[in-house]
Amino acid sequence: MSTVEVPPELIGAWRRSGLFIDGVRQIDYCDVLWLQSSTWFADIRLRLDPAAEPLSPAARRMARPFASAGTATWADPIFTWTSTLGNSGPPDANSLNWEDGVVVERGTIALDHETFTFAEEWLRMNGESDEPIVTCRDRYLHIAVGKWAIAASASDNDGPLIAKRLKNNGHTWTEVGSVQV
């Protein structure tokens, strides 16, 4: 299996449309946006209702506000996201497959000496002509696809990642939400 750039069918803007833990569909407590170029990615998870609390530990982990940004590689069927900004932890590598018109990511979560399986369904949000526009410089990454953008920065490699989700109303970019990890 050789590693290659991200295939064109996975480049774009994606929104998490379904979450399963150990095969059971979960209430999704977050609005998750993933933006992908041929080599760069950014994702941000914003809580819909910060007061609501998922019941299971695995569901709580998937519902925490979060963001990551960095490089991505593809070795069919494994997609690897390597966060390069801030103190982001190890790479995230999971299988991605097309199923019934959506991309399904499958992986495992290890929590408190237990392992849970998860599946996330991803729906494409951009039009065919929306090419990712990437601005990358020292400890800063901005990816825009169509009317969505994520700006991520870190003051140093060990510091927190600050990410902002942006939406373009046709004339200006407006912040939808932000997280610090």
Image (spheres, rainbow, N blue to C red):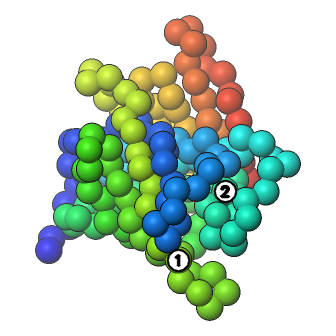
Q: Amino acid at mark 2?
A: Ala
Badge 2 element: loop
Residue 165 x %, y % = 62, 36
Q: Amino acid at mark 1?
A: Phe
Q: Quadrant of the N terminus?
A: bottom left
Which residue is the site of mark 1?
116
Closer to us: 59 or 77:
59
Q: Quadrant of the C terminus?
A: bottom right
* Cβ atoms under marks 1 and 2 closer than 8 Å: no
Q: Is residue 154 visible?
A: no
User: Which residue is situated farthest in the right direction here?
Assistant: 51
Which residue is the site of mark 2?
63
Residue 122 x %, y % = 41, 45
Q: Is residue 112 left or right of residue 39?
A: right
Mark found first going from the N terminus, 1 or 2: 2
Compared to residue 25, the image places residue 93 above or below, namely below
Mark 1 nearby-residue class (10 Å; few <14, some 14–19, many ≥20): some
Residue 155 x %, y % = 69, 56
Which of the labelled discs sits on residue 80, or is there none? none
Q: Residue at x 37, y 35 (%)?
A: 124
Q: Residue at x 71, y 40 (%)?
A: 48
